[in-house]
């Protein structure tokens, strides 16, 4: 089934993906600095790793958006400030699940538009987002 979007629409959607990655960076940065307690010690190491990977996701998206002739956004979405452990992890999981769905669609759309290089560049974002979802589900006991 065709998703029926053109190259400009793909670029626009990737800019929304980029804004979502900026949100991840800001959100994880707050959570890594504020979550406390023995039970979150090993989790903090994972969240720090996520944070670093979100920066690389943002960099890859910006590069691909430029490659497609777009201008990478500098808009950061507004982000709820949540610092209790359960609330923070749920917020992180929700965001990662949204991103997972977005990257599934984006890779399919890039392929349909005959842009295999773009699809390939986005593949690690999909795979790492899957890992992030798994880590957070485990942490939340889901
Ligand atoms: Fe990401
Ligand atoms: Fe992530």
Image: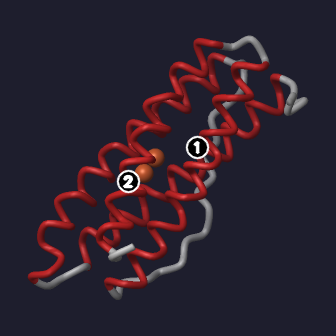
Q: Quadrant of the C terminus?
A: bottom left
Determine the residue positioned at 43% across, 31% down: 124
Q: Secondary structure at mark 1?
A: helix
Whether 4 is drawn above or below 74: the answer is above
Tell me: is circle 1 under 8 Å from ligand 1: no
Residue 119 place in picture, x, y as percent: 60, 22
Instruction: Compute the Cα span from label 2 to label 1.
Output: 17 Å
Q: Which mark is residue 132?
A: 2
Res 85 → quadrant: bottom left
Determine the residue positioned at 36% across, 65% down: 136
Q: Which residue is mark 1?
A: 18
Residue 99 place in picture, x, y as percent: 57, 51
Tell me: is circle 2 under 8 Å from ligand 2: yes
Q: Quadrant of the N terminus?
A: top right
- Asked whether 23 or 113 is in front, the reply is 113
Whether label 2 touches label 1, CB < 8 Å: no
């Amino acid at each position: 089934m065709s998703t029926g979007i053109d190259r400009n629409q793909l670029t626009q959607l990737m800019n929304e993906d980029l804004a979502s990655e900026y949100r991840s960076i800001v959100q994880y940065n707050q959570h890594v600095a504020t979550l406390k307690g023995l039970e979150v010690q090993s989790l903090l190491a994972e969240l720090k790793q996520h944070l670093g990977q979100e920066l690389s996701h943002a960099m890859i998206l910006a590069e691909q958006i430029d490659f497609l002739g777009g201008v990478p956004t500098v808009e950061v979405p507004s982000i709820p400030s949540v610092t209790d452990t359960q609330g923070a992890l749920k917020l992180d999981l929700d965001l990662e699940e949204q991103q997972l769905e977005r990257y599934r669609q984006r890779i399919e759309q890039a392929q349909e538009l005959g842009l295999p290089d773009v699809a390939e560049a986005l593949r690690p974002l999909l795979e790492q987002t899957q890992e992030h979802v798994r880590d957070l589900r485990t942490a939340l006991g889901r």
